[in-house]
Amino acid sequence: MIKAKINNIDVRSRKEHNILWAARKAGFTIPRSVIIPILVPGGQCGICVVEIEGIPGLKRSCMTPIGEGFKVRTHTPRVMTVRKQLVELILSNHDTDCLTCIKNNSCELQKLAATLGINTLEYPKLEEKLPIDKSSVSHCPRSQ
């Protein structure tokens, strides 16, 4: 078993587990964009970033194995700033017509944006309308 600290709380985890898993098991919430259990985290979005004392840069908790003696911080000002920027970038290329979406008020991206205090978009809205890929289980069907 690996011994580490997450937000100054002692945690134990198996060496094959990532930081995201260890944090969730210990009761900590780290946002992530992959909210569908059958999808494997791939680190593409970066929303689950954390700081690890003594390691430069931020690390994606879904892709970083928990390490012996790690001191992980999940919600530092630096982490929150980066998460907010990443969600704003996702929203810049996202259909933000939430009121007509059947996921309205049950959408994880919508909840995350609200949690991060995103009320306006800082990045220019991309108006690229691509065909909807309905082959994925993450497809968000819209009411017609």
Image (cartoon, grey):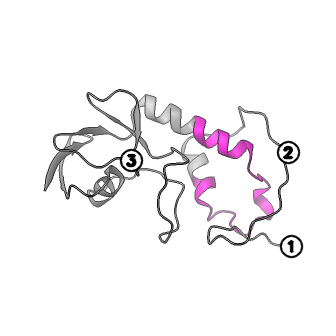
Given the image, on which type of amino acid does mark 2 rest? Glu
Residue at image mark 3: 61
**Residue 98: image x %, image y %?**
75, 58
Is 15 situated above or below 85? Answer: below
Q: In the rendered view, does 6 fall on the left or right side of 107?
A: left
- Alpha carbons under labels 2 and 1: distance apart: 20 Å
Counting residues from the start of the chain, the first of labels 3 and 2 encountered is 3
Instruction: Please state which of residues 67 and 85 is positioned toward the viewer in this rendering.
Output: 67
**Residue 64: image x %, image y %?**
35, 47
Q: Residue at x 56, y 50 (%)?
A: 112
Counting residues from the start of the chain, the first of labels 2 and 1 encountered is 2
Q: In the rendered view, does 32 fall on the left or right side of 2?
A: right
Is 29 situated above or below 124? Answer: below
**Residue 138: image x %, image y %?**
62, 67
**Residue 108: image x %, image y %?**
58, 59
Residue at image mark 2: 127
Bounds of the magenta segment: 85-111
Residue at image mark 1: 144
Q: Residue at x 76, y 52 (%)?
A: 96
